[in-house]
């Protein structure tokens, strides 16, 4: 089989939604990471601010990267979806992203959206990475 599913036990069960948290293309060593949100095991958010959710989402992203055999340093592309007008949050999220990504500096896209996975979800991050 050319693909390997990644579903770390620390993350919620995505199977009722038809997803895996990541899929590795074993032929190319590319890791495709589903949009990570600030959900606990019961699909509830733990924080109600964009900054707080972004920090939790990036922690969740790290959990999935580790489970896939990758790391922040191996991120190739990151897409950040924020509920509302992205420009209104740039000053607040830029320092969080700069600290998290450090020298990795992947291709990065930020997108303001009208809705996300739940009404309480303010941030979602999906990514592509290489294996270590």
Image: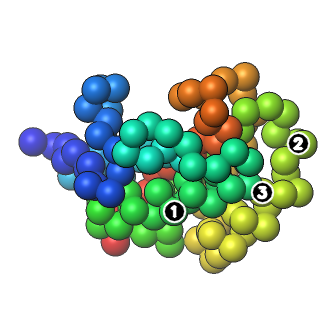
11 sits left or right of 3 in the view: right
Q: CA distance from mark 1 to mark 3?
A: 14 Å
Task: Identify the residue at horizontal 34%, vertical 26% (top origin).
Answer: 17
- Disc 1 element: helix
User: The residue tagged with tag 3: helix, strand or loop?
Assistant: helix
Q: Is residue 81 visible?
A: no
| Residue hosting label 2 | 87
Q: Residue at x 88, y 57 (%)?
A: 91
Residue 71 position (above or below residue 107): below
Of the numbered discs in the image, which one, if any, rests on residue 59? 1
Looking at marks 1 and 3 on the same chain, the residue that comes earlier in the sequence is marked by 1
Residue with the mark numbered 3: 93
Q: Nearer the viewer, residue 38 or 85?
A: 38
Q: Position of residue 83 (x, y in %)?
A: 73, 33
Q: Image quarter for residue 81?
A: top right
Q: How is the image coloured?
A: rainbow
């Amino acid at each position: 089989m050319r693909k390997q599913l990644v579903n770390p036990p620390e993350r919620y069960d995505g199977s009722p939604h038809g997803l895996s948290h990541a899929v590795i293309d074993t032929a190319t060593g590319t890791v495709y990471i589903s949009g990570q949100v600030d959900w606990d095991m019961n699909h509830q958010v733990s924080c109600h601010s964009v900054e707080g959710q972004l920090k939790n989402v990036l922690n969740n992203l790290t959990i999935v990267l580790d489970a896939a055999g990758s790391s922040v340093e191996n991120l190739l592309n990151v897409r950040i979806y924020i509920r509302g007008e992205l420009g209104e949050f740039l000053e607040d999220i830029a320092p969080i992203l700069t600290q998290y990504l450090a020298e990795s500096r992947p291709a990065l896209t930020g997108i303001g959206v009208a809705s996300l996975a739940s009404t309480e979800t303010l941030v979602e991050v999906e990514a592509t990475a290489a294996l270590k």
